[in-house]
Amino acid sequence: MSEHRRKPPQGRGRRAAQPPPSGRRAATSRGTGPGSHGSRAESRRAAQSSGGGRRRAAAASASGAGAGHGRGRGRAAQVRKKRFIDYPRSDKQGARRWVPSWKQVLGSCFGFIGLLIVAFAIALWMVDVPDQAKAEARSQTNVYYWANGDRLAVAGAEGEKNRQNVSLSQMPKSLQNAVIASENASFWEDSGVDPMGIARAAFNMATGGDTQGGSTITQQFVKNNYLSQDQTIKRKVTELLISIKAGATMDKRDILEQYLNTAYFGRGAFGVQAASQAYFGKDVAKIDASEGAYLTTLLNGAALYDPYEGDQKANEARSQKKWSSVLRREAEVGKLSNAKATELIRKGLPDIKPPKKAMDKKGQKGYLIDLANRYLINNNVLTREQLNRGGYQIRTTFDKKKTFAMRDSVNEIYDKNIDPKKRPDLDTHVQFGGASVDPRDGKIVALYGGKDYVKHFTNNADETGVPVGSTFKPFVLAAAMRDGIRDRDGAKEQSAGQRTVVNPDTSRYDGDNKLLIHNYDGTVWKNEEGKIWRQTNDGGYSYGDISLREAMVRSANSPYVQLGMDVGIPTVRKAAEDAGLLSSSLNKSNVPSFSLGISTPSAIRMAGAYGTFATQGKRTDLYSVTQVIDQDGKKLPMPQRHSEQLFSPDVANNVTDVLTDVVQDEKGTGSPARALNRPAAGKTGTTDGNKSAWFVGYTPQLSTAIGMWRINDDATAKNRKFLEMYGTGGQKKIHGASFPAQIWTDYMIDALKGTSVEKFPAAQPLGEKVFGPGMSPTPTPTQTETESEEPEEPSDSPSDSPSDSPDPSDSCSAHDPKCDESGKPGDDEGQTDDGGANQGPGGDDSGPGWPDGGAGHGGADGGDGGDGGQGGNDDDGGLFAGTGNKPDE
């Protein structure tokens, strides 16, 4: 053992084996303990030495820890950099950590595109190309129900009955060229889709616009194989996928053939073969270039281009324009020579045959079904194509009992009185039309559309172009009591809106026959040729000084023509619209005879408008369908119905009170309706030339309109002419009080059987006492031009010649109806009771016939109006004025 190695100190027992204490305790122990051999200074130095050691150890420890932490952070950073997607970016600070790198952006784009390709491939693999057989199998029937839930009819599967497939070789090349040129000129070269059209459709859907547009023939072929025609993004995407697959896997000739065999052409015709038979009565193989071009126009909305559908004149004009554009387009793309196209256009539209109706719609069923379908189409519940494809359950508002009661009432009158064999020149072509409405909620409960839907396709309850005559007068009275007459003496202040509300009992008007009509400011009314005009009364009878109530009861024309001029024709027109008549059915001329019913609203609309008075001035939307259930059992949303108070209860109740007298007064023209034996209000109407007669009336629960007329052609809407009814049914003249009032009464008795008798609300007095031109607060008796005692039955026709001129006088009032506008007695020069010419050839029986749409004005004796002129009124004796016709909605 080395001599330099010091021996460890010797301890005692267990304590010696323990290490010596450190720090202050050790020093203290050594310095103060019993065995201590060092001084205090030594102890202090030892303590200081021990403390310094601790600080150095702490520093060393801290240094080591820092080094270890730095190494750990480096390792963590290395781990983060190795992430598959370094986002947020670890090597950036602050907001820059969240900005992706170009590699990340590019990688994300490639990844997204890859996913789209995979998804597209899967979707393309899952869809099937159209199968023509499956498309045909999807055509189903619609089931229609009465209001009580009983089955009305099974119809609408016209696709099954009116479909016949033909090969492309049987379709004329001219037809194929017309379709391709018009619908998809690049058909033979494109891939089956139109990217620009798709982008346009997507933009329109995103912005809420029209979702149609830009489809290729392939896309249209695919769409034709869908039962649902909903314009949704899901359906559009599905259509796109199928179109791409069809374009890639199907032969173009097969696509064109199947498209032309499944496309809808209207009239229940699916495919060109059925369409050719429906419109031209021959096989498609036999149609020429002009007929092929017309069938092509139907692909863009058959209901708009069929001259026998809807607004027929508008449809014919649209079809002429579209048909011409198809031929020009063929020439433009080189499929038809310019010379040939010009020649065909010069010849005009091909001969289009009227539609034939399906036998499952015979009797009244077809009229009810068509009205229900029109309601659904016009209110965007279903498209016409959806209805024809079928599969819907449709609950209507039609009351089974009431519908049969109206049919039976018409048939009874017809069978007892109309005999075409006995009176072939007088009783042929007689038509009746009627409709009944519940005024409390607007539902159409019954209608009579004609003898048989299959034989007479025009729905006589809907708008048929028949003037309504004096049944229009209540709207004139309503306007006078709601809006008032204009101030004659303050004409220059009319801009201030000065008007006087009329009291129907105290107000007095001149009821003389051949009354000279004045403007509200006292000047004599003149037509466009500068001729003045006298208003006649039915039978040539003069009533003298008469109240508006009495004039309504007797159906005197002169007072109401002058009242309409005092109120203002535009104001009267607005009152009629507010009551519920369609603007499209109202004559657009502001002529005096407007107040006497030269307009042509339908029986449905007349019943609804009178119902507004029955409900104290509240107009309610009319409707004919309450529920539609689709193929999946889902209820389709129905249009919301609206009610609006458009006449005050006082005005409506006063109109009702006056019309009640028309029925209840023994001298009232509507007195035959008293047989109903319950409170009822109504009005008769007979038009010029005795070409139509009406009775419209109501109780608080039911409003009904019945019309009667003769028309020369029941099968077609073209070249129609309304015929006189003098001698029809064995009567000298058909009045509203005759057959129409009898039918109305018989029907209402049956329809209201078992219901409570309800009274109308009491009418409260309103308005002021006003006087027509030439009238005064103390009128003198007026000498009538006929016998002093009123005849029980009006004479056959109004007088054909103007009244004698009054004796000259220097003291003639400017408001005197016997004076001209200068204030001097007239001498009949330039005066006429035949209306002269106003917007068309006038005069007695002059001008082209009814109803081509012009605005000619005919004579007081019933002369037909000009091009499209409509008849004046026989008990209204006035002008004709033309207007277009549009079906009720």
Image (tube, rainbow, N blue to C red):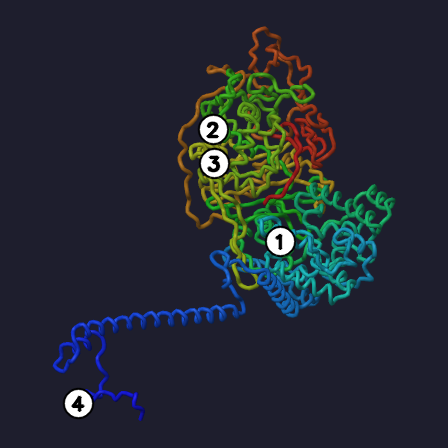
Of circles 3 and 1, the one toward us is 1
Picture residue at 37% right of the left edge, 71% below the top: 65
Instruction: Identify the residue position indicated by label 4 in the image.
Output: 12
Q: Are marks 3 and 4 in contact (CB under 8 Å)?
A: no
Q: Quadrant of residue 195?
A: bottom right
Which sits earlier in the primary sequence, circle 1 or circle 2?
Answer: 1
Instruction: Identify the residue position indicated by label 1 in the image.
Output: 202
Find the distance from the CA under tag 1 to the CA under tag 2: 54 Å
Asked if residue 76 is positioned above or below residue 664 in the image, the reply reads below
Residue 661, position as x, y percentages in the image: 47, 33
Which sits earlier in the primary sequence, circle 3 or circle 2?
Answer: 2
Find the distance from the CA under tag 4 to the CA under tag 2: 136 Å
Instruction: Identify the residue position indicated by label 3 in the image.
Output: 646
Of circles 4 and 2, the one toward us is 4
Q: Are marks 1 and 4 in contact (CB under 8 Å)?
A: no
Q: Residue furthest left?
A: 34
Position of 523 compared to 169: left or right? Answer: left
Residue 485, position as x, y percentages in the image: 50, 23
The three-letter amino acid code for the residue at tag 4 is Arg
Asked if residue 800 is positioned above or below residue 706 in the image, the reply reads above
The three-letter amino acid code for the residue at tag 1 is Ala
Q: Are marks 3 and 1 in contact (CB under 8 Å)?
A: no
Q: Secondary structure at mark 1?
A: helix
Residue situated in front as seen by the camera: 854 or 304: 304
Instruction: Identify the residue position indicated by label 2 in the image.
Output: 481
Find the distance from the CA under tag 3 to the CA under tag 4: 125 Å
Residue 367 visible in image: no
Q: Are marks 1 and 2 in contact (CB under 8 Å)?
A: no
Which sits earlier in the primary sequence, circle 3 or circle 1?
Answer: 1
Q: Secondary structure at mark 2?
A: helix
Of circles 3 and 4, the one toward us is 4
